[in-house]
Image (cartoon, coloured by chain):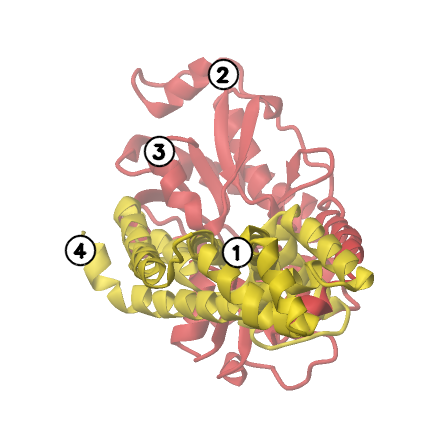
């Protein structure tokens, strides 16, 4: 019987699938066009350090998200924009690498450790929560921002205001991400796994899931794009998600250098500017750089 | 290696879901596919046309499109469900039934035309000819390709992992993310559980074939 459902619609299906694809694909660019921080002229680093290698190569590969508004989103022009991207550009500039010499690689939640270990990327700035388990695989500089987990629901939803409300209900999140395991293990939700957070929007729209959960800043980006469709269940977050910059395990010199740079960005105002140019458009409270974790 | 042992509960859960998806979709596809094949050889032109169109369209579209249609487009058209397994079953059975139909049709073509003529000459209706004479012989001939299709179905069910269903492949992704240091072993485990379904299926096919083969 089910096969018959699709019979007259086979052609229609192809057409509507194509339309839906384009609908979900062109969610508009991010906010702003991104900046071009001036690269440092011929920076000098101790021989043999990662900084020296990258500086002399004159190019760097940075992993980021391509589908997260405000932090890392690839627009139609093929250039990613967002707060993570700005942080990446600032770091590259300190290595004497101009923004157009950065190769951006998409790193989704599930492949970040692998990409670092395999050397596919030199750095990862991708809403990457620092946790102990991940610290056994990779090293983290930072945190450069602290987010927290929240819930996004349909605009007309009044039944979910706190995480305890999702017990036994369908909640969409990304396979293998921190928020996904938290919502299942701590709050007893039924996980509907998706490949990316943007893939969660469709089931939510169709009321097949009650909520989408991940870090508040990511959700804020979605709400910002479609304020008539979605809202945050509450402004309170129920976890702390410190975002760090992932790099190869054991490269302490590089990690310390990045930490120093982050502190310098906070001092000279470029951290604040990066925020205001991107996520600050939606999230009004400008963040302070969290205390750097120099473990 | 330890990762497989310590993740056995997840593997097992994924294994059961993959088995469930494949079994339900397989049964639906066998029934629908056989009906499609019957329509394809029926005397009614409209049925023949419909069956041909369906098989050609579905067989030549990627499975991912079928999944996208079932999981995303159908809900947009108002067919909503809370379990995404339903979308997976719709996609897998719609897709697989086209292949089953072709296999059955090739079996029908292998039955000598004299069989049908003889059946007609003793006064059987088309339905009787098909169900009593042609199909039983046809289905026997096509056990091997049919099992091939079912094995492909088991593996195709992994696409569900990308469409909101947590099955073997979905767990594989999750485990790979949790154990970044042992991704290879995670995948070995996933492969093992797929083989746990497909290898016995092949063996079963061999046995069934020996039992029902017709000497021609």
Where, by quadrant of the figure, is residue A246 drawn? top left
In the figure, is residue B68 to the left or right of A166? Answer: right
Mark 4 or mark 2: which is in front? 4
Decide which of tag 1 and tag 4 comes sooner along the chain: 4
Q: Which residue is mark 1?
A: B162
User: Foreground mark, 3 or 4?
Assistant: 4
Marks 2, 1: nearer the viewer: 1
Which label sits on residue A124?
none
Which label belongs to residue A118? 3
Chain for numbered disc 1: B
Disc 4 chain ID: B
Give the quadrant of residue A261.
top left
Say whether residue B57 is visible. yes
* Left or right of residue A39, residue B173 in this image: left
The residues tagged by marks 3 and 1 sit, at their Cα atoms, a distance apart of 24 Å
Residue linked to disc 4: B2
- Callout 1: 10 Å neighbours few (<14), some, many (20+)? many
Q: Residue at coordinates 54% horizontally, 51% vertically from top-left? A: B110
Q: Characterize the local packing of mark 2: few (<14), some (14-19) or many (20 or more) Cα atoms within 10 angstroms.
A: some
What residue appears at the point 54 percent right and 84 percent down from the top-left corner? A165
Which mark is on residue A58?
A: 2
Give how far apart the Cα atoms at labels 4 and 2 are: 42 Å
Query: Chain B appears in which tint?
Result: yellow
| Discs 3 and 2 share one subunit | yes
Q: Chain of mark 2?
A: A
Q: Secondary structure at mark 2?
A: loop
Q: Position of residue B59 (x, y in %)?
A: 63, 49
Residue drawn at x 39%, y 23% as measured from the top left: A51
Q: Position of residue A41 (x, y in %)?
A: 53, 15
Q: Are marks 1 and 4 in contact (CB under 8 Å)?
A: no
- Name the side, left or right, on which B65 lies relative to A140: right
């Amino acid at each position: 019987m089910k096969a018959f459902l699709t019979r007259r619609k086979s052609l229609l299906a192809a057409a509507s699938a194509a339309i839906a694809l384009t609908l979900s694909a062109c969610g508009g660019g991010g906010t702003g066009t991104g900046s071009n921080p001036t690269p440092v002229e011929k920076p000098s680093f101790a021989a043999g350090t990662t900084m020296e290698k990258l500086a002399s190569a004159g190019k760097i590969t940075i992993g980021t998200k391509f589908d997260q508004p405000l932090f890392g989103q690839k627009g139609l022009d093929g250039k990613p924009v967002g707060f993570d991207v700005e942080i990446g550009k600032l770091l590259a500039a300190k290595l004497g690498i101009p923004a157009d010499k950065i190769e951006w690689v998409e790193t989704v939640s599930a492949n970040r450790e692998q990409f670092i270990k395999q050397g596919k990327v030199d750095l990862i700035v991708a809403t990457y929560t620092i946790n102990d388990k991940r610290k056994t695989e990779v090293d983290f500089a930072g945190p450069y921002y602290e987010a927290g987990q929240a819930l996004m629901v349909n605009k007309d939803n009044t039944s979910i205001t706190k995480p305890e409300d999702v017990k036994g209900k369908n909640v969409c999140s990304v396979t293998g991400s921190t928020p996904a395991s938290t919502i299942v293990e701590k709050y007893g939700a039924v996980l509907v796994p998706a490949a990316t957070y943007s893939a969660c929007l469709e089931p939510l729209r169709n009321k097949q899931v009650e909520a989408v959960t991940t870090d508040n800043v990511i959700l804020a980006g979605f709400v910002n794009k479609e304020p008539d469709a979605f809202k945050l269940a509450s402004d309170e977050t129920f976890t702390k998600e410190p975002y760090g910059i992932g790099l190869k395990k054991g490269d302490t010199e590089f990690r310390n250098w990045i930490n120093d740079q982050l502190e310098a960005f906070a001092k000279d105002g470029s951290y604040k500017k990066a925020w205001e140019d991107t996520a600050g458009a939606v999230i009004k409270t400008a963040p302070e750089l969290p205390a750097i974790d120099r473990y | 290696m330890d990762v497989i042992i310590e993740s056995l509960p997840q593997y097992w859960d994924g294994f059961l879901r993959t088995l469930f998806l494949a079994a339900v979709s397989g049964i639906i596809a066998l029934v629908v596919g056989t009906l499609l094949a019957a329509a394809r050889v029926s005397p009614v032109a409209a049925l023949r046309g419909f069956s041909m169109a369906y098989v050609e369209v579905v067989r030549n579209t990627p499975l991912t499109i079928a999944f996208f249609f079932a999981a995303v487009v159908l809900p947009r058209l108002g067919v909503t469900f809370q379990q995404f397994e339903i979308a997976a079953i719709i996609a897998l059975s719609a897709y697989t039934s086209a292949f089953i139909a072709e296999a059955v049709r090739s079996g029908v073509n292998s039955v000598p035309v004299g069989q049908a003529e003889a059946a007609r000459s003793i006064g059987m209706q088309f339905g009787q000819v098909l169900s009593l004479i042609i199909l039983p012989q046809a289905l026997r001939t096509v056990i091997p390709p049919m099992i091939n299709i079912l094995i492909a179905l088991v593996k195709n069910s992994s696409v569900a992992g990308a469409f909101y269903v947590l099955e073997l492949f979905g767990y594989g992704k999750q485990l790979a993310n949790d154990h970044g240091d042992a991704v290879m072993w995670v995948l070995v485990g996933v492969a093992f559980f797929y083989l746990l379904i497909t290898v016995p299926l092949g063996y079963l096919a061999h046995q069934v074939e020996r039992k029902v083969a017709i000497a021609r």
